[in-house]
Image (cartoon, rainbow, N blue to C red):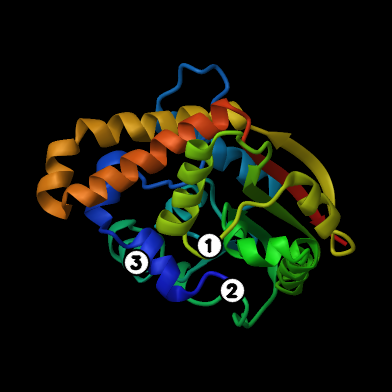
Amino acid sequence: MTSTQAEIDLSYSVSNDFFQLWLDENMHYTSASYFSGTESLEEAQIAKCKILYEYAEMTPEKRVLDIGCGWGSNLLYNATRGVKVAHGITLSTAQREWAATKMGLPAAYEVKLQDFWTYEPTEKYDALQSIEMVDHVVSPEQANEGKAVDLYRNYFKRCADLAKPGAYFGFQAILRDRVPRTRQDLADLKFTADVIFPGGLNPRLEELIMAIRPYWECVEMRTQRESYGKTTGEWLRRLLANESTIRAKWGDQVFVDYERYLRTCVKAFDSHWSSDVQMKLRRC
């Protein structure tokens, strides 16, 4: 993984209380799935979890690993549907602390402060999930050197090593697509990458399609560019509603940076610079 633990902590550890002000009530920091367009953010996040639960073909008898589990929000959904054992791994100390102390997860659910590349479970998993963690696998420099597909393939091989043959994988990723044409738009995207999410890069859809083979088969796929636009738009609305609190508790610069980041995200999805994909993968 190109993003170091220090970079992960920089991205996700401003303060759990800070993120709680503008994310949904269960702290999902990934795209929700809107269908009617009239859902609340909370309802659309549950819809996202439902898709990925079903893509992973989970049942109450299965063991699942959530790779890059964040604050444990998707694990909490799994608990409402039922799985035998659920493990989540993250490199964020703040996220792991929140998941362990605030989420009220069942005893068979555990969030571990663990590097994906070195994690060695005692038993392979029946199902995998990963929601927008893959953007920490390839750096912009590596992509410019033509290494992206090989590095993503290493990621999917590592995922396959953690899963039983025939296991299903509910996978979600932010995508980069078109390139903006103005200096300001390019600068805003670079700011988001360098300041908010240092060390990472969103993949292109074609890179992922090439990289899943020979370890996984793509059984089903859907994109949701507009859903991520709605998600980031609601995050921005909630951030702006809490401007005075954020400036008072974390300083003007934190507010300015996150407003710029979220406005850039909203524009990126509206302008087709970015998208989002959900895949149902089956281990070969």
Instruction: Check if mark 2's residue and mark 1's residue have beta carbons within 8 Å.
Output: yes
Between the C-alphas of marks 3 and 1, the distance is 15 Å
Q: Name the residue under label 2.
A: 116
State whether residue 123 is above or below residue 216. below
Inspect the image, locate mark 3, and give the three-letter code of the amino acid beneath it. Answer: Ala
Where is residue 119 drawn, in percent x and y?
59, 80
In this picture, residue 43 sits left or right of residue 224: left
Closer to the N terminus: mark 2 or mark 3?
3
Q: Can residue 22 be seen in this view?
A: yes
Neighbour class for label 3 at 10 Å: few (<14), some, many (≥20)? some
Where is residue 275 drawn, in percent x and y?
63, 37
Where is residue 70 drawn, in percent x and y?
44, 58
Inspect the image, locate mark 1, and give the three-letter code of the amino acid beneath it. Answer: Gly
Inspect the image, locate mark 2, and give the three-letter code of the amino acid beneath it. Answer: Phe
* Secondary structure category for the residue under label 1: loop
In this picture, residue 269 sits left or right of residue 206: left
Q: Residue at x 50, y 77 (%)?
A: 114
Residue projecting furthest to the left: 248
Q: Residue at x 9, y 47 (%)?
A: 248
**169 or 138: which is nearer to us?**
138
Between the C-alphas of marks 2 and 1, the distance is 8 Å
Q: Nearer the viewer, mark 3 or mark 1?
A: 1
Q: Name the residue under label 3.
A: 100
The quarter of the image holding the N terminus is bottom right
Closer to the N terminus: mark 3 or mark 1?
1
In this picture, residue 22 sits left or right of residue 75: left
Between the C-alphas of marks 2 and 3, the distance is 18 Å
The quarter of the image holding the C terminus is bottom right
Tell me the number on the disc at residue 68: 1
In this picture, residue 88 sits left or right of residue 263: right
